Image: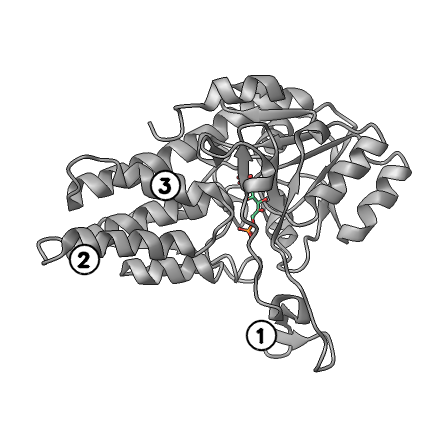
Amino acid sequence: MSLKLRIDGKTVDTPAVWWDDAANDVRMINQIKIPFQVEVHSCSTYRDTAKAIKEMIIRGAPSIGAAAAYGLAQAVQEFWNQDAFVEHIKSAYNELMAARPTAVDLKNGLDFVKKYDQLNPKAALNRAKIFANRIANEGLKIGQIGKELIVSNMNVLTHCHTGALALVDNGSALAPLIQAWEEGKRFHVYVDETRPRIQGRMTAWELSQYGVDHTVICDSASGFFMSQGKIDLIILGADRVVRNGDIANKIGTYNLAVLANHHNIPFYTAFPTSTFDSSTRTGNDIIIEYRDANEVKQALGYSNTLMKNQIVSLYAEGEEFSNPAFDITPNNLITGYITPYGILSQSQLEKTFINRTSQ
Ligand code: RUB
């Protein structure tokens, strides 16, 4: 069964991010344009790739991990046979690493490429491809394992985006939902809008491609739906899962976890190997990315008049804003971890993942 990226309802061979052998560059679906246009963005240097990660043309922890891995492979090509090759690669590694600090997939992707003892263009590219393909394959497994949690007539809430776009292909938290739907289970998905970057529109777009019943809600409405008994299950992704099972995920995840706990609603996170951080012990040690205030102050939408994307102001000049992109949810609020190795409890996490992230 294919859960791959669909465009206009048709499965496409294109993942969210890939290496184009003919053009010798990195390509990605431009996520800023989704759902209004499906456009491919090309990066011909490692700096282009770092910029695409920073500006969120590519987003979702595993997808940015794969992009960073390809970016380092580009740097190896760019500086191969030059003086100070090692210094150049170190600085490219640091630049790519700094593009987005919270999702550990980025570091895991870079280390996976860098670890190769004989860093040369062919080997580095090969490693990057292995890293990206592994993520995509793990999405399928996550779907197969997680779909058992889905039963007909239930209502499921999700936050941010966790489909094929976020996970190179196939999806993490969306994979169980789409697989269950393809098997004939019928249920309803509430999609959090996910302010300020509105990743919910990518989730809604991906669910639409598969015909999965869904409703988009404002983030602030989720507590109301829980209190009305309208939510039976919450599944979302993660940007970093640390050794004690605390997770960093899109801002608003913590609010959902506290509310889910209050209402006794099962709360699951789904993620691939690349999202596990085997060197960090607790959520307190995770660096939270603060993004530009303009993301709160303004909104990006599609103008039907201009027939193109347009940025509009939401506030008067002079206001102050704070824009943390992620929050930390402690392990005691998480019912289970949907992984390629099974649905794990907090106590099984560390021994399952340790030594796996860099292999
Ligand atoms: C994306 C985000 C996603 C996780 C999970 O943030 O928080 O929920 O990356 O993705 P941003 P997945 O859009 O800021 O990159 O479940 O696919 O690992």
Residue toward you, 203 or 98 = 98
Q: Residue furthest bottom?
A: 317
Crowding around mark 1 (Cα neighbors within 10 Å: few <14, some 14 to 19, many 20+) is: few
Q: Position of residue 163 (x, y in %)?
A: 55, 41
Crowding around mark 3 (Cα neighbors within 10 Å: few <14, some 14 to 19, many 20+) is: many
In terms of sequence position, does the residue under pointer 2 or pointer 3 come before the other?
A: 2
From the viewer's perspective, is 47 left or right of 244?
left
Name the mark nearer the viewer: 1 or 2.
Answer: 2
Q: Position of residue 54 (x, y in %)?
A: 45, 60
In terms of sequence position, does the residue under pointer 1 or pointer 2 come before the other?
A: 2
Crowding around mark 2 (Cα neighbors within 10 Å: few <14, some 14 to 19, many 20+) is: some
What residue would you read off at disc 1? 307
What residue would you read off at disc 2? 78
Rendered view: 353 above or below 62:
above
In terms of sequence position, does the residue under pointer 3 or pointer 1 come before the other?
A: 3
Rendered view: 185 above or below 287:
above
* Type of amino acid at the residue the image marks with label 3: Gly
Name the mark nearer the viewer: 3 or 1.
Answer: 3
Residue toward you, 91 or 217 = 91
* Type of amino acid at the residue the image marks with label 2: Glu
Q: Position of residue 91 (x, y in %)?
A: 28, 56
How much space separates mark 2 and mark 3, taking CA atoms? 18 Å
What residue is drawn where x is 75% and y is 25%?
Answer: 152
What residue would you read off at disc 3? 109
Rendered image quadrant of residue 286: top right
Location of the C terminus (image quadrant): top left
What residue is drawn where x is 54% and y is 33%?
Answer: 242
What residue is drawn where x is 22% and y is 42%?
Answer: 124
